[in-house]
Amino acid sequence: MGALNNNCFTDAGVHIVTVRATQILLHKPEPSTFGERIATAFISALAAALTLLAYFVLNAVFAAKSGSNLPLVPTMIFSKLSAYIICAAALAGFLIGSARMVNIFSVFWGTNQIWEREWFRKLFLILSVAFIVLMILLRT
């Protein structure tokens, strides 16, 4: 059986999970109504669309400063993949609720505490590059 030591559970010296992560996973939010779920789905879709738009605008600004052409940016904003991401955010918002969607979007907006960890920044950079490569491959 694990023991509580320095804000983490340990079992034979192996770090399993932090107390904070356990609190988040075991947290049971208040039940929400169907209307609240619909509202969360709509707001999640809107937030996903605005997040995608912000990423594409930042990409366009940096590309314009470097002097490169931007033929992909308008087509990427209105692509099928963007529509799939927005629909997935709406579905996730409906299924998991507002409290968990706030945590998900805080990761993408850079306001989550996990951004303070170096390994996460590296992981997110790798995933971002993989996503960009996937977008380019799907475009061609």
Image: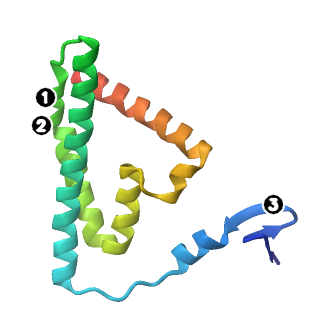
Residue furthest out toward the right: 12
* Secondary structure of residue under mark 2: loop
The amino acid type, in three-letter code, at marker 2 is Phe
Q: Residue 51 in the image: x percent, y percent?
A: 25, 48
- Measure the alpha-carbon separation of dots 1 and 2: 5 Å
Q: Residue 81 in the image: x percent, y percent?
A: 22, 40
* Secondary structure of residue under mark 1: helix
* Disc ID at residue 75: 1
The image shows residue 55, relative to residue 139, as above or below, that is below
The image shows residue 125, relative to residue 97, as above or below, that is above
N-term-proximal mark, 2 vs 3: 3
Q: Does residue 140 appear anywhere in the picture?
A: no
The image shows residue 29, relative to residue 84, as above or below, that is below
Q: Look at 26% across and 55% down and name the residue there.
A: 88
N-term-proximal mark, 1 vs 3: 3
The image shows residue 121, relative to residue 130, as above or below, that is below
Q: Look at 53% across and 55% down and name the residue there.
A: 114
Would you call the spot at circle 2 few (<14 residues within 10 Å), some (14-19), or many (20 or more)?
few
- Measure the alpha-carbon separation of dots 2 and 3: 46 Å
Q: Residue 120 in the image: x percent, y percent?
A: 55, 46
Q: Look at 12% across and 37% down and name the residue there.
A: 78
Quadrant containing the C terminus in the rendered view: top left
* Disc ID at residue 78: 2
